Amino acid sequence: MRPEELLKLFQNVGAIRQGHFELSSGRHSATYVQCALVLQYPKYAEQLGRALAAEFHDLKVDVVASPALGGILLGHEVARAIGCRAVFVERDSTGRMALRRGFELSPQESVLVVEDVWTTGGSTSETMRVIEQAGGCVVAVGALIDRSNGRLEFPVRAEALLELKAESYEAALCPQCRAGSTAVRPGSRSTRTSA
């Protein structure tokens, strides 16, 4: 799937929104990408999973891991395309990411970490930490959309299907806040926790 096709798909389902948003990272932006609006359609979820899996065709991947909530569906579809199992990490009662629900990794299993959107890369980095603590070996990371404007550096190979130019700001530096606007929080995290 070419980047322009991906962008058109997201635009057609209304997944790229304009306004004043507080992202799950805590940063503010005039652009919000709600991947769930695309992934709600099984046909698109499957296509996107296959397209992202194809970016890693040359790697041995035993497990695809993703952060809850946004990455679960995508992680499952990428794992299906690769032909391996899918697990996810989620926040525990302390707010820290953890492998739960009986998910386990065998020593040195090769793991691909998959996320829907990167802004700061925080959820992906937290997922990598959890996977490595559980004995897995993260071989690469992937996302549908990278909106970091080239600011991300992961210690492993990283691939995104689309780079979306969308500025984000620390809340104290947000031009919309300075103009008196209040940000809305459309993401899955109702409260932020420190990593």
Image (cartoon, rainbow, N blue to C red):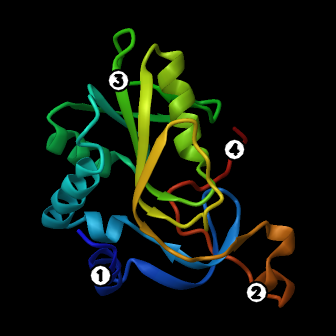
Which one is in front in this view, the residue at disc 4 or the one at disc 1?
A: 1
From the top left corner, tell me how far across and down residue 79 is, in percent. Answer: 22, 39
* Quarter of the image where one finds residue 3: bottom left
From the top left corner, tell me how far across and down residue 187 is, in percent. Answer: 52, 63
Badge number at residue 13: 1
From the top left corner, tell me how far across and down residue 44 is, in percent. Answer: 19, 66
Badge number at residue 35: none
Q: Which amino acid, mark 2?
A: Ser
Depicted 105 relative to depicted 31: above or below: above
Q: Residues within 10 Å of mark 2 (few under 14, many from 20)?
A: few
Q: Mark 3 points at which residue?
A: 110
From the top left corner, tell me how far across and down residue 147 is, in percent. Answer: 55, 67
What whole-number distance in Å separates the C-alpha atoms at marks 4 and 1? 30 Å
Label whose residue precedes the other's in the sequence (3 or 2): 3
Q: Which residue is drawn at 26% across and 25% down?
A: 62
Badge number at residue 193: 4
Which one is in front in this view, the residue at disc 3 or the one at disc 4?
A: 3
Q: Residue at x 16, y 45 (%)?
A: 81
Residue 69 relative to residue 25: left or right: left
Depicted 181 relative to depicted 114: above or below: below
Q: Which amino acid, mark 3?
A: Ser
Label whose residue precedes the other's in the sequence (4 or 1): 1
What whole-number distance in Å separates the C-alpha atoms at marks 2 and 1? 26 Å
Q: Tag 1's secondary structure?
A: loop
Q: Are marks 4 and 1 in contact (CB under 8 Å)?
A: no
Q: Mark 2 points at which residue?
A: 181
Using the image as rendered, state which of residue 3 and residue 37 is in the foreground. 3
The answer to whether residue 115 is visible is no
Q: Which quadrant: the N terminus?
A: bottom left
Q: Residue at x 42, y 19 (%)?
A: 136
Label whose residue precedes the other's in the sequence (2 or 1): 1
